[in-house]
Amino acid sequence: MSVKVGQKAPDFEANAFYEGGFKKVKLSDYKDKWVVICFYPGDFTFV
C-alpha cells in the first residue's frame, strides 16, 4: 500500500506514549483535526 500527497491516509491503530504512559490510538480518533505523524523505525533499537 502506498500513500501519496493529497490522499487520505488509511486508518490504522498504534501504540503511543501519552501523558506518561502507553495507550492505543487510531488515526480515525482524530478525524477532522490536524495531525502530524512521525515514524522512527530505528528508535529504541540497538542497531
Image (cartoon, rainbow, N blue to C red):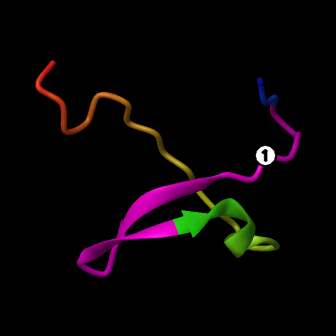
Q: As drawn, which residue projects farthest toward the right?
A: 7
Asked whether, in this view, residue 30 is left or right of residue 31, the answer is left
Tell me which residue sits at (23%, 78%) in the image. Answer: 20
Amino acid at dot 1: Pro
Q: As drawn, which residue projects farthest toward the top?
A: 47
- Name the residue beneath numbered marker 1: 10
Instruction: Please rate how many residues cluster around mark 1, counting C-alpha atoms within 10 Å: few if below 14, some from 14 to 19, many from 20.
Output: few
Tell me which residue sits at (74%, 66%) in the image. Answer: 28
| 13 is within the stretch colored magenta | yes
Asked whether, in this view, residue 9 is left or right of residue 45, the answer is right
Q: Look at the picture and state if 47 lies above or below 19.
A: above
Q: How many marks?
A: 1
What is the quadrant of residue 31 in the picture? Answer: bottom right
| 25 is within the stretch colored magenta | no
Front-most of residues 26 and 6? 26
Disc 1 element = loop
The percent coordinates of residue 33 (x first, y second) are 74, 73
Q: As drawn, which residue projects farthest toward the bottom?
A: 19
Q: Which residues are magenta?
A: 5-24
The percent coordinates of residue 27 (x first, y second) are 67, 61
Tell me which residue sits at (78%, 46%) in the image. Answer: 10
Quarter in which the N terminus is drawn: top right
Q: Look at the picture and state if 30 lies above or below 1.
A: below
The percent coordinates of residue 6 (x first, y second) are 87, 40
The percent coordinates of residue 21 (x first, y second) are 27, 75
Quarter in which the C terminus is drawn: top left
Asked whether, in this view, residue 11 is left or right of residue 24, the answer is right
Tell me which residue sits at (38%, 36%) in the image. Answer: 40
